Amino acid sequence: MTEPETVLLQAQQAQLLLYSMGYRRVYGFLPEDPPNRQRSLQLFADLVRKEILQEQKESLVLQSPWRDCLRGWGEADGVLRLHTADTTIPDCCCYPCGEDVVVCTPQPRRPQMLRLTRLPGKMLWTWMAENYQLPGEEEGTLFCEQDGQVDTALAEAWQKGTEPEQLPGFLFVLEYRTWNGTPPRRLAAVQRPLYRQLLVQREQQVFPLPYREAELQRCLQDWICPEKEKET
């Protein structure tokens, strides 16, 4: 997959720019407290020096693609968060914006620096699989699934209150939240002795499914890029 265009911003710079664009409440990897006036001036000066902000008609204008990424972040009405078993890799947050997604990821060695990537929603699973080394349908991992039957013990454990990260063989969890109070949707992947499986939370129930990329793609599409109802 060709890497989509990516931009880098300090977390404090992203916070200031989002605020200046009118977005007062934004979920993500931002400082709890805004920088003071002196620090804000330094951050804006750095944005001008790097030509992220350019003077046009006696005002500073945020350039694309920074503008497009931040607008998608600020206008999103929900967020998909990826958390993996590898604690050395920061989570990523994915913000749906129309048919696209803005992915925000702190840099592992410089967590104060954010990488923003805007890509088509249908490419999200491929992007995450490549950048986070998530497992695919490798040959030899699915042979013991008989007629689609998978172990239900982990699903029952999750349903009884065990968090996905505490399940044996935990690989990663995807959680999608919206700002309207709708219960979050979650999907976890776990490694069994001879195969992998998915646990999908729907309302108050957890369903075990075979680990299939098609199922992962379908869930992501339904969550972040649902098909609009056709007008009659």
Image (spheres, grey):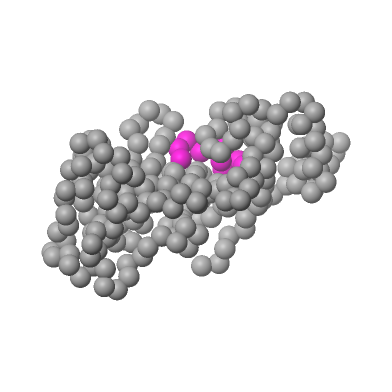
Q: Is residue 143 left or right of residue 51?
A: left
Magenta run includes residue 19 = no
Locate the C terminus by quadrant.
top left
Q: Is residue 40 left or right of residue 208?
A: right
User: Residue at (79%, 48%) from the top-left corner?
Assistant: 51
Magenta residues, as a range?
68-79
> Is residue 141 visible in this depiction of the protein?
yes
Say how many tags the image has.
Answer: 0
Q: Residue furthest right?
A: 58
Magenta run includes residue 78 = yes
Q: Quadrant of residue 72?
A: top right
Q: Residue furthest bottom?
A: 139
The percent coordinates of residue 2 (x first, y second) are 55, 67
Vertically, is 148 above or below 36? below
Q: Is residue 2 left or right of residue 43?
A: left
The percent coordinates of residue 130 (x first, y second) are 47, 63
The percent coordinates of residue 149 (x first, y second) are 14, 59
Q: Is residue 6 left or right of residue 103?
A: right
User: Residue at (85%, 39%) from the top-left corner?
Assistant: 57
User: Residue at (17%, 64%) from the top-left corner?
Assistant: 145
Q: Quadrant of residue 16?
A: top right
From the viewer's side, name the closer residue of 171 and 197. Answer: 171
From the viewer's side, name the closer residue of 205 and 141. Answer: 141
User: Residue at (28%, 58%) from the top-left corner?
Assistant: 191
Vertically, is 53 above or below 31? below
Vertically, is 92 above or below 141? above
